[in-house]
Amino acid sequence: MNVFRAKMIVYVIAAFGGGVVGAIVAFQLLRIQPAAAFSVINWTAYPLVIVVIGGSASIEGPIIGAVIYFAMLQT
């Protein structure tokens, strides 16, 4: 298989996936503004809090931290 062709296919699939996720995030935020989409709190502080709650020593830690974090948000 041609290496260039394989890299191009992977790039196109990754770009498509990123575009779909970006569209979903934009729909979730209900407004499209740079401050809403690229907020430091949304993309750095929340994941760090989730990892601290659950622990980073295993794969299950961040998953448990996310469940606890979102459960605390609901109450």
Image (cartoon, grey):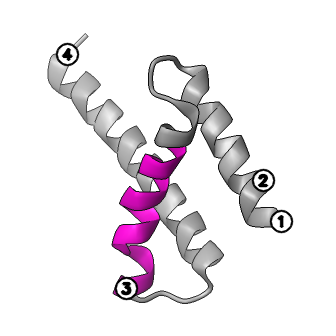
Q: Are marks 1 and 2 in contact (CB under 8 Å)?
A: yes
Question: What residue is shown at x 48% (from left), y 57% (from top)?
Answer: 46
Question: Alpha-carbon distance for marks 1 and 4?
Answer: 54 Å
Question: Alpha-carbon distance for marks 1 and 3?
Answer: 27 Å
Quadrant into which the C terminus falls: bottom right
Question: Alpha-carbon distance for marks 4 and 2?
Answer: 48 Å
Mark 1 burial class by Cα count in 10 Å: few <14, some 14-19, many 20+? few
**Which numbered disc, 1 or 4, marks the residue that appears first in the sequence?**
4
Question: Alpha-carbon distance for marks 3 and 2?
Answer: 26 Å
Left or right: where does residue 75 sit relative to residue 28?
right
- For disc 4, the marked residue is 2
- For disc 2, the marked residue is 71
Q: Amino acid at mark 3?
A: Ala
**Which numbered disc, 4 or 3, marks the residue that appears first in the sequence?**
4
| SS label for mark 3 | helix
- For disc 3, the marked residue is 35
Mark 4 burial class by Cα count in 10 Å: few <14, some 14-19, many 20+? few
Q: Amino acid at mark 1?
A: Thr
- For disc 1, the marked residue is 75
Please report the bounds of the magenta region as a residue range.
Answer: 34-50
